[in-house]
Amino acid sequence: NAGVTQTPKFQVLKTGQSMTLQCAQDMNHEYMSWYRQDPGMGLRLIHYSVGAGITDQGEVPNGYNVSRSTTEDFPLRLLSAAPSQTSVYFCASSISGGNTQYFGPGTRLTVL
Amino acid sequence: AQSVAQPEDQVNVAEGNPLTVKCTYSVSGNPYLFWYVQYPNRGLQFLLKYITGDNLVKGSYGFEAEFNKSQTSFHLKKPSALVSDSALYFCAVRWGSGGYQKVTFGTGTKLQVIP
């Protein structure tokens, strides 16, 4: 099993550009989530999904969009990048909400 | 509201000495608690969790955590620290209901084990 994979590993954007961070898991997990990690702030939940076709907002959803068309994939879209979105982004999956999560290796995003 | 506090940004300990990384929590209902570890430039890895039962939970790499309901704490411990334990440690608490349960993370504690 590859576990949770994320692409790209690094990305630099200019303010106003859009992009999609990819996340995939091969463990048949129903629950997937996106976090951002910033120094001194730990991990903050952006969006999550409890199954294909079902998504909900976390604590910092503004500026981000998600969809879940398959169990395996959970892409995160930045609609119009801003410098405040410079961060490290982690995707995670688990059997169910609130259970042990398996994390991807992260995407380091810089917005200029 | 649910929350997790890790009062120490950094903990330094000499190799071979016992280590403790502190965590306190606030959550409605019965707590469901986790510890994760993050090595440099890596994603988080699960260490251990408390659901119910024995207050001393054993996890990966020789780590254990002690659940104390009266003090609302869930401190991470290891009897003898290794240099390879140096990493960032996160405490987390589950909250919510039904299938929409979520996890809130603390701000992390950097553990530095000195040779």
Image (tube, helix red, strand yellow):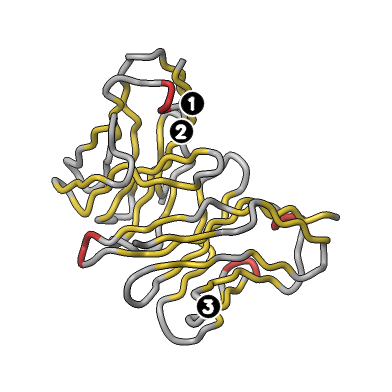
- Chain under callout 2: A
- Name which residue type carries label 1: Phe
SS label for mark 2: strand
- Chain under callout 1: A
Q: Please tell me how many numbered marks the rendered image carries.
A: 3
Report whether mark 2 lies on the same chain as mark 3: no
- Name which residue type carries label 3: Gln
Q: In front here: A73 or A59?
A: A59
Q: Tell me the number on the disc at residue B71.
A: 3
- Name which residue type carries label 2: Thr
Which residue is labeled 2 in the image?
A107
Looking at the image, do the residues carrying marks 1 and 2 touch, with CB atoms under 8 Å apart?
Answer: yes
Please say if A63 is above or below B96: above
Q: What is the distance, in whole Å, between disc 1 and disc 2 at their CAs?
A: 6 Å
Q: Residues within 10 Å of mark 2 (few under 14, many from 20)?
A: many
- Direction bottom: furthest residue: B54
Please say if A9 is above or below B65: above
Please say if B73 is above or below A45: below
Looking at the image, do the residues carrying marks 2 and 3 touch, with CB atoms under 8 Å apart?
Answer: no
- Residue B111 vs residue A11: left or right? right
Q: What is the distance, in whole Å, between disc 2 and disc 3 at their CAs?
A: 37 Å
